[in-house]
Image: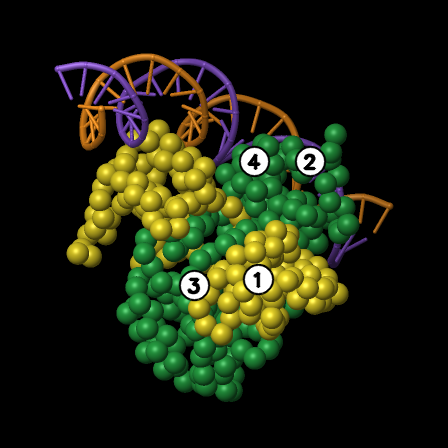
Chain colours: A yellow, B green, C purple, D orange
Amino acid sequence: MHSEVVASRSADPRDSRESRNGSPQLDAVSLAIIEQLQQDGRRPYAAIGKAVGLSEAAVRQRVQKLLDQGVMQIVAVTDPLTVGFRRQAMVGITVEGDLEPVADALTAMPEVEYVVMTAGSFDLLVEVVCEDDDHLLDVINKRIRALPGVRSTESFVYLKLKKQTYMWGTR
Amino acid sequence: MHSEVVASRSADPRDSRESRNGSPQLDAVSLAIIEQLQQDGRRPYAAIGKAVGLSEAAVRQRVQKLLDQGVMQIVAVTDPLTVGFRRQAMVGITVEGDLEPVADALTAMPEVEYVVMTAGSFDLLVEVVCEDDDHLLDVINKRIRALPGVRSTESFVYLKLKKQTYMWGTR
DNA sequence: ACGTGTCTTGCGGATTTCGCAGTTCTGGGG
DNA sequence: CCCCAGAACTGCGAAATCCGCAAGACACGT
């Protein structure tokens, strides 16, 4: 049942079964809208409507809802290493006890851009963006390792970003 | 009035010294523009101009140039796990010999969204987005591990994305 | 059948985007 | 020192887009 490009799932936007993590399930049309905006976040609503078979106003409302629900965000993304001389790293973390409070504490740190729970030899992976080496050292050694429950960390300092895309929809 | 947004670096946009990796160095005004668009990728040029002290047309030109140069992209970003039932993982890779050809081969794979060279116990970190477990297994075992030069890989399957922002500019 | 909630459509009016011409600023020769 | 070329910025009118609103369509539960 994986046939059509856009029609493999229900076409009814009212199809709002909640998935297990609380985010609403998306119908094929919303998926197509997201796909359009993954190519160009500023594409006009009318153009999107033509592409997905909806009126301009309908697209506008669905985009607004997707934004409000937090399902998607339309933003400028850059390579932080390019934009100023900063230090960036991925940090793998192992935790004892409950993951949630640790993850929440990390999420609250402004230097932490990305937090994900994983299966494997790390419990959490977080991406850190810092001004310089001192700042990075401070965040990792003083702030992250100081969190209760953190058993160990391993850092991977970024040398060069080779690829960064958001086009999973378009293939 | 809050003009004079950021003045720590050169205010001359012609300040185009190339940094070592080939990307142009950005002046304070372009940085401020990017910061605006990190908050809302669809913010109108006139509003940005007011915030950074430039005319609407000037902002438009600079944004266009930043996009053309590949310094920034304006796109919709989502949590792939939310948008359809997919499998996602971070893969740490160690390489023997030159990193570049391996990194380039990974960059060419559509399932690979993110490729970064790192210092630490992995040489490369790549993020993979797949349809399902079979697809993920195929990409990691058949495609990535098959690349010449790849010595070993370690996978971290995503369980839950907790945070994903692009607001480094705003702090 | 009826009402309810949601999605959709179709419009003006306000806003934004776009293209262009003219001006300013900077750096490099002559 | 002057002048020129290139790049960036401004201002403005026309076209396109965005936005809010009211009305129609549709599925669903009572």
The nearer-to-camera label among 2 and 3 is 3
Q: Which residue is mark 3?
A: B158
Per the image, the residue denoted by label 4 is B45
Mark 2 on the same chain as mark 1: no
Q: For numbered disc 4, what is the local secondary structure? A: helix
**Disc 2/disc 1 C-alpha distance (Å):** 33 Å
Which residue is found at the position 50% from the left and 87% from the top? B96
Three-letter code for the amino acid on which mark 2 is drawn? Gly
Question: Spatial distance from mark 3 to mark 1, Cα to Cα?
Answer: 14 Å
Q: Amino acid at mark 3?
A: Tyr
Same chain? Circles 3 and 1? no
* Badge 3 element: strand
SS of the residue under disc 2: loop
- The residue drawn where x is 75% and y is 39% is B4
Q: Label 1 belongs to which residue? A: A127
Labels 4 and 3 touching (C-beta < 8 A): no
Residue, disc 2: B53
Looking at marks 4 and 2 on the same chain, the residue that comes earlier in the sequence is marked by 4
Horizontally, is A8 left or right of B89 in the view?
left
Marked residue nearer the N-terminal end (2 or 3): 2
Task: Say whether residue B4 is left or right of residue B100.
Answer: right
Q: Looking at the image, which residue sits at the far front?
A: A97
**Quadrant in the picture for residue A160:** bottom right
Question: Around disc 4, counting alpha carbons within 10 Å, would you say few (fewer than 14), some (14 to 19), or many (20 or more)?
Answer: many
Instruction: Determine the chain carrying the residue at label 4.
Output: B
Write down the chain letter for disc 1: A
Please tell me in which quadrant of the rendered image residue B109 appears.
bottom left
